[in-house]
Amino acid sequence: MARHERRVRLAFLIVAEAASLAWSGAADEGPTLRAWALPPGAQKAEGREGWKALSAEAARAASLAGGVAVETPDLVAVLAAGSAGVSLAPKAAGKAGAARLELVLVDDQGREATGLKDLRCAECDGTGVTIAFAAGAAEARLKIGLGKPFVELVPGTGVDAVRMRGRARLAFIPDFFGSDVLYDATETRVDKVYAPAENFFVQLLDGHAALAMLVWPKEGADEVVLTPEGEGPARRFAVTQVGLKGKSLYVALLAREGIWFGKDLASAAKDETFVVEGWRPPFAAKWMTILAKRPALGAASGVASETMEAKALPPKGDTPYSDVYVHPWVPSWLSGTEWRLHLQTELTHMMTREKVRSPDFLLAVNYPRDRVKGTPLDAFTLVDVMRGALGAGPCEYILDLEGLNKTRSTGAAGTGKPTAAATCSERGGLMYYYLSERAETPRREDPLAATDQALESVEKIKDFLDAAHARIQEYLAWSDKIIELADSAAAKEPAAKGLADRVIPIARGMRQLWNTMAEHGKPCAFPEEWRLALDHCKDLIRQAAPNLAARVRDFDPQMRGAGEEVDGGMQALRMAVKRIRQEAALAGAGDPKALGLAAAVRERCRDVLRNKHYKEGDSVRLSGIGEGTR
C-alpha cells in the first residue's frame, strides 16, 4: 500500500513540477495552465472568439468584466459574467470532449444564485490559480491546478450548497466496505433522491465517455440530492445538489472514450460465458463491475447491485474461487482486453446446500476504481481523484484502508496466538506429511520434530476455528443491536419505518441461518465438540497410536467440515451486513427524514466490516442468505 501511494503521489508531483505556470506560450513548453479574459456575453468554452490571453501579471491586474476562462491539460473552466454558473469542459477529443458540467451556487435561502459577477484573480502561483466571484449575495472561490482533473469550489458568504448540472442515467456512491450504491434514473420513481453519500459521489455521464465525481472532506457535505427529469427510458438525473457546511467541494470531470461502460442484460445469455461487445478497457486500471439485478431490493430510489473487481482471468474464468455459493465462475472478468460475463440462473448455497435462483439481471457497469502498475500518468481513476483532492493522509483516513487491511490476522480473537491457519490447507499438511499418509518424505526426518510439527498443525486448525467462530458470534451480536437500533428509530420517526422494515428481516436472517446450522447438527455450531476432537487428535499424535492417520481422519467432520462451515458462516454473515449497508442507502433515500437511521446503520455496518478475520473475504456473488432475494 505504501509503495503504491508513493507512486501515485510521484505521478502528481512529476506533472506539477514539469509544468511551471506558463499562462501563454508554445505548445511544446509542456503542460501549462492558461487564462483568458472573456468578452461580454461569452458563455461557452467552444469557439473562443474574442478571448484574450492573459499573463499572470495581467490576470492579477485585470478587471475581468466579461469573465475569465482557465485551461489546464485536463479541463477548461469558464466563468462568464452574467452566466448561471461555472462551466466545466474536458480537454478531450470525440464524444469525451462533448461532456459538460455546470456548477451553480445555492444561497442560504435555498435559491439559485445566478449571474456571475465581481470576477477577479485572487491568487496565482507556479501550479494554480484562484478565481474569486459572486452571484447574487453569494460569494465563492474556484481553485484550479495543474495535474489535477478537478476544480475546488470554496464557499464564501451566503453559500449553502452547489448544484451540478449534467445529464446521467446512472449515479452511484463508491463503497470500499460493501457494494457500491447504484441509482438508475429510469428505475427511480421518486421526485428526489436523498443519497446518504459519506465523502464521494459519482455520475456516469451519457455517452460512456465521461464521468463526474464529487468529493468533500470529512465533516463536509451534509446532503446529496438527485433530481431526475423525464419519463421512461429518457429519464435522467439532471441536477445533483450538495450541501457544503462551509467546506470545499471538489468536482472532477474525467473524460476518455470508454472510461465507463454499461451493458444492458435484459436479453443476455445465462449459464454460459459471453464477451461484451463494444468495449475494451481504454487503459490499465483496477476495473470494477457493478452488477444490478431485479427484483430490485431497494426502494423506489435505487436498485440492488453487487460490486466486484473485474480481474484478469483466462477465457473460461474458471479459477478456484470460494464464497457463500458453490460455483465455478466469477460473473465478470477481463480476458486480455475482452470483458466477459457469466450469469448463472441458479446457485447452491455453500452452507445450507439450497438451490437459490438468481434474480433477473438488469445491467453491468464497468468503471476504473484505482491505479495499477501499468496505468498511464495521464489517466485518472476514482482513487486518484480522492487522493488528489483530499491528500493521501486524509483520504486513507476516510477510506480507512489501513484499518481494513490490519485485520485480526492471527489466532483466536483476542488471544494473539500467531498460529491460526485455514483448516483445508493445514489439514492436508497434517495428513500427507506429518502423519505420512502419502508416500512422500515427511517434511522433517526427525520423528520428534515431525511430531512437534503435527501438534502445531492441529493447534493452528483449532485456533482458526476458534477465531472464525468468535467472529461469527460478533456478527450475531451485531445483528441484535441493529434490530434494536431500527426498532427504536422507527418508533421515534415514522418516516424511518420503511427502512427499518427492510433492515430488520435481513438482520434476523443472520441469526436464523446460524440457528438452522445448529438444528441440523452441523459441527460448526458446536465448538466444544471440535475442541474436544482436536485435543484427542493431539493425544493420538503424542502416543504415536497405531493407524494414526486413519484415526485422525475420523475427526474430519470436526476438523475440515467445521472449518468449511465457519468459513462459509463468516462469508454469509459478512454478505448480509454488506446487503444491509446497501439497503440503508437505497431504502433510506426516498425520504430525508429517514437519513438519520440510514447514516447510523451504514456507519455500524462499516465498523463491523472493517474488523474482519484474516480469512474473511468479500464475496462477489448474490448476498441473500439462502433466499435469493438480492
Image (cartoon, rainbow, N blue to C red):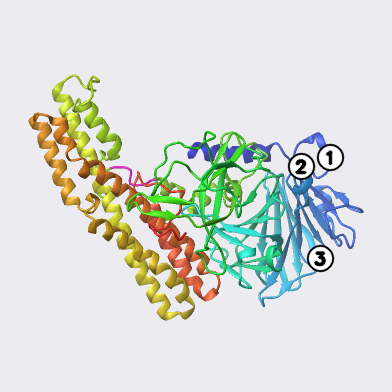
Who's the residue at 40% across and 80% down the image? 491
Q: Position of residue 425 (x, y in %)?
A: 30, 35
Who's the residue at 32% across and 51% down the image? 351
**Distance in Å between CA atoms under marks 2 and 3:** 26 Å
Residue 229 picture quarter:
bottom right
Mark 3 Cα-neighbour bin, 10 Å: few <14, some 14–19, many ≥20: many
Image position of 308 (left or right of 539): right
Residue 54 lies in magenta, yes or no? no
Q: Main secondary structure of the magenta part?
A: loop
The answer to the question of whether label 1 and label 3 lie on touching residues, with beta carbons closer than 8 A, is no
Mark 2 Cα-neighbour bin, 10 Å: few <14, some 14–19, many ≥20: many
Q: Position of residue 243 (x, y in %)?
A: 61, 68
Mark 3 — residue? Answer: 83
Image position of 87 (left or right of 275): right
Amino acid type, callout 2: Thr
Q: For the magenta stretch, what is the residue range?
A: 406-410
The answer to the question of whether label 1 and label 2 lie on touching residues, with beta carbons closer than 8 A, is yes
Q: Nearer the viewer, residue 293 or 446?
A: 293
Closer mark to the observer between disc 1 and disc 3: 3
1 or 2: tag closer to the N-terminus: 1
Res. 25 mark: 1
Mark 2 — residue? Answer: 32
Q: Nearer the viewer, residue 339 or 599?
A: 339
Who's the residue at 57% across and 52% down the image? 390
Amino acid type, callout 1: Gly
Image position of 429 (left or right of 395): left
In the figure, 26 relative to 588: above or below?
above
| Residue 204 visible, this angle | yes
